[in-house]
Image (cartoon, rainbow, N blue to C red):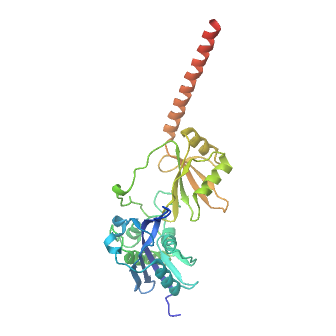
Amino acid sequence: SSNPGVIAMDCEMCETKCPLTGTKNPRALCRLSITDGTTGDVLIDTLVKPAWPVIDHRTWVNGITKRHLSNVTFTLEHAQSFVGTLLSADTVVCGHAVINDLVALQVEHYTIVDSSYLYKCVGREDYVSPSLKDVARTVLDGMEMPSIHDSVNDARVAMDCCIFYKDAEYEVPRVLKTPRNKAPERRKKTTKSDKLLVVHRLPAGVLPEHLTEMLLSNTFVSPTNVADIVIAGNFGKTTLEFHSSAHATLAFETLPGKALLDVGGYSSKKVFLRNGSYVRIRMNISPGQVAARKEAVDSELSKEVDTAVNQERETAAA
């Protein structure tokens, strides 16, 4: 009863890899920060020792280095024990994309207020979530947040954004989405392969095998590979690779739904899942490139037909 009824939470994650199986965890907890939702007081702020060796500290995001974690003894189990003591079923947990924090903690909790759901982006579809930095700049008097995350500060700012939404009686401006801070040396450039389909807006719990099953049931075309699902904000994103560009095109065109151009100019479809939610699947090349590719294929096929016909004529003449 002495615990706060509302808290704000933010976590920092790194990527780890199991030395035995090679399995990667792109959301391994490495810092946990929780503040009192009413007073802003820090209830806990601690580094967390990952269970597996770290392969990417993501220092460019969270400022955490190998040196910072070298002598840490506080583990995920300690974090879960603290959170379990702090929360009741009625405790309101606030945060920005807070579902990602709960996933990193491996804790289930259903009484949440997520600021990433409360705000929409200017000129974008409603499922696109703005960053906390952009929300704060829009509704908190032009607040500029640092490029390196501070999970205590992020928890407090997310709480303030939730309070602003409530005080404004849910009538809030749309947020101008700005480019994210990137680390080119850590991110591979996306290959514009015509053998790929891009899947985004994946809800939590969707696995690669679910996507393969969905494609087979709707198109009878199976991908040769489904890339690891990467979570960003509230949803995940992945790519489906096919045997050829023709297979990728056939899979996309056979999927149910009307193809529309997204904000990037790519053909995209809304595909519904069994539980009533939906994902977005788009081509990885523009409609102009698709048309040019089809024209090239048709031209090549025409040449092959002409060659075969001429060979038959020559044989008949002989």
Q: Residue furthest bottom?
A: 2
Please identify the residue farthest to the top as the structure is shown.
318
> Do we see residue 27 in this rendering?
yes
Looking at this view, is 294 or 15 the one in front? 15
* Quadrant assignment, res 68: bottom left
Residue 144 visible in the snapshot: no
Image point (52%, 60%), residue name: 236
Q: Position of residue 303 (x, y in %)?
A: 55, 22
Which x, y percent locates residue 129?
48, 63
Q: Is residue 255 above or below residue 210?
A: above
> Outermost residue toward the front?
20
- Give the residue at x 51% y 68%: 117
Question: What is the total number of numbered labels drawn onto the structure image?
Answer: 0
- Choose between 128 and 213: the one closer to the eye: 213
Give coordinates of residue 165: x percent, y percent. 48, 74
In the rendered view, would you say 211 is above or below 267? below
Name the quadrant of the C terminus. Answer: top right
Comparing 221 with 201, the one in front is 221
Residue at image location 41% in from the left, 80% down from the top: 74
